[in-house]
Amino acid sequence: MNTILIKKVKDRFITKFSMEPILVFSPGRINIIGEHTDYNDGFVFPAAVDKGIIAAIQKSNTNTSTAYAIDMNESVSFELDKLKPSSEGSWENYVFGVVAEIQNRNKLVGNFNIAFSGDIPAGSGMSSSAALENSVVFGINELFNLGLSKTEMILISQKAEHNYVGVNCGIMDQYASMFGIENNALLLDCRTVEATPFEIDFKNHELILINTNVKHSLSDSAYNDRRSACENIASLLGIKALRDATEADLIKIKNKVTPINYQKALYVIQENNRALKASQAMVEGDLETLGALIYASHDGLSKQYKVSCEELDFLVDQAKLNGHILGARMMGGGFGGCTINLIEKTETESFKTIVSEAYKNKFNKDCSIYSVKLSNGTHVIK
Ligand code: GAF
């Protein structure tokens, strides 16, 4: 855990509010495979990581609540019965949304003060949003003894994202961040919202993330558009979600959908199968198969689902040129952020040098490379 960050958040909270806080850590996540399958009721394979949000929270002794974004040096005070979404893109929507959704469940929230900071690189596709939402709901639940279950809390976080942030996300990010288990990835069935943990030991291989350090605009609306396209095709097929469709089912309605949307639905069906196959490959310790599935996932995300970008495709191509990377793909919603790479440990250092140089030459900007540890989900820091 990032002890410097914990100290910073605690100190800033005490300086600003003159009271001792409860401290909550809420992690970001990686996802091995199963991208854009969560809102199709499908399977995903994420894990919580050792980077995340630290929130400090305590009851306020005034008639208002205050949220303080330490990294932006911005704070906002608000009244609990007058919440509404703030302007698009503002960080306070994550806080307001969670508080509003708790209140929608008739749970009484008293006034509180919260301060937060994090070490998840912004726009990296490692879910700083879900980490922030979970830290807020978890902290409030502790503070006011609301008795919310972890599952209720992630549904509140997800609704906050839908109704206040405006992204109709699935449940993967909030789930992984809340329920993460050290050294494990979670094969999550997004229909039942239940997961099977898999202890991760890649032996002489490891996962590294390469951040493009770009986040192309329109990613939120493109995300929502894809979700609606999937839902429309599911309803044409007369099923609840694309998770219930096979490729054969899809062929039957081929003439009723645009070729572009047909490819998107096909991608979802194929990716869902890849996520299941990947978990089987993990059980068998078959890293070659796992890697091939990861490359195939990127191919689908780029060519069929069309959520990649030049920078992500370039990084995956660089990985393919190196014979020691079993699989690489973009991770998360897309249009920027990180690739995830399954690489032979002895090759990591030299690949870092090669890919950094190549990326700089091509885009005249730096990529960033991280190793992450798989960690436990949202919890109070004692
Ligand atoms: C984003 C969303 F928040 C997730 O729910 C998921 O759909 C992901 O994109 C794509 O797999 O992180």
Image: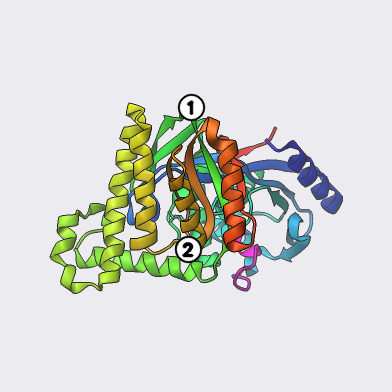
Q: 298 or 251, which is in the foreground?
A: 298
The span shown in magenta is 83-94
What's the mark number on residue 139? none
Q: SS class of the residue under badge 1?
A: loop
Q: Main secondary structure of the magenta part?
A: loop
Give the image location of residue 65, x and y in percent.
72, 59
Amino acid type, residue under disc 1 in the picture: Asn
Residue shown at 70%/56% (left/top)? 111
Identity of the amino acid at label 2? Cys
Image quadrant containing the C terminus: top right
Q: Nearer the viewer, residue 135 or 112?
A: 135
Q: Secondary structure at mark 2?
A: loop
Indicate whether residue 105 is drawn in magenta: no
Which residue is denoted by mark 1 in the rendering? 204
Residue visible at 30% across and 57% down in the picture = 267
Instruction: Determine which residue is flagged by label 2.
Output: 309
